[in-house]
Image (cartoon, rainbow, N blue to C red):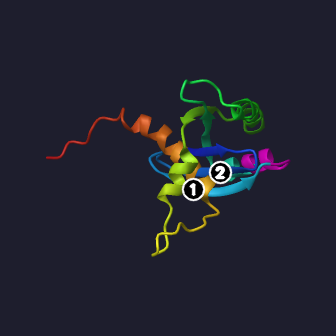
């Protein structure tokens, strides 16, 4: 099954896709958070044959909702209604910062600007979710 990962932000929303086996998460796109967002998400789900959606959950270190989480909960409900797909929440901590840390650098050490940073954060959220399932798979025996 193919999954869609989302890093929800007030200005931009990062989108990532898994492969068909649900093992890999790859950055896909960054969409503006505005009026056409749900329609765009539904189109991606339909075009890419998505079976489930993974949405980053924003909590603080005490496990309490951050101010953004209320908007995420509203978006989750609207996304489920619009797409008809299950939407799972996946805890995310500093995924945007981690995505920035992983970005390529110029030879002098300066970080390259990357328009896909939010999509890379979405891929980290999705990868975290997918890794939980891959750990349940029995190890491959080598003869």
**Mainly helix, strand or loop, the magenta region?**
helix
* Whole-percent x, y for residue 116 in the image: 62, 60
Q: Which of marks 1 and 2 is nearer the N terminus?
A: 2
Left or right, residue 11 beside residue 56: right
* Whole-percent x, y for residue 140 in the image: 25, 42
Q: Tell me what residue is drawn at x 47 percent, y 69 percent.
A: 109
- Asked if the residues shown at circle 1 and circle 2 are in contact, with their CB atoms under 8 angstroms apart, the answer is yes
* Whole-percent x, y for residue 18 in the image: 53, 49
Q: Is 59 rendered above or below residue 5?
A: above
Residue 126 belongs to the span the image colors magenta: no
Q: Mark 2 points at which residue?
A: 14
Secondary structure state at the residue bearing disc 2: strand
Residue farthest toward the left in the current orientation of the protein:
143
Q: Mark 1 points at which residue?
A: 27
Q: Is 7 rendered above or below residue 84?
A: below
Q: How far apart are marks 1 and 2 (CA)?
A: 8 Å
Q: Magenta residues, as a range?
A: 34-42
């Amino acid at each position: 099954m193919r999954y869609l990962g989302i890093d929800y932000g007030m200005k931009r929303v990062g989108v990532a896709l898994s492969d068909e086996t649900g093992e890999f998460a790859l950055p896909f796109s960054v969409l503006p958070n505005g009026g056409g967002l749900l329609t765009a998400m539904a189109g991606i789900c339909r075009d890419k044959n998505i079976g489930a959606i993974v949405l980053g959950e924003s909590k603080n270190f005490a496990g309490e909702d951050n101010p953004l989480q209320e908007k995420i909960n509203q978006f989750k409900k609207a996304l489920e209604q619009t797409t008809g797909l299950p939407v799972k929440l996946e805890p995310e901590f500093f995924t945007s910062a981690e995505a920035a840390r992983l970005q390529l650098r110029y030879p002098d050490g300066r970080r390259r600007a990357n328009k896909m940073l939010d999509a890379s954060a979405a891929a980290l959220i999705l990868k975290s979710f997918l890794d939980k399932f891959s750990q349940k798979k029995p190890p491959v025996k080598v003869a």
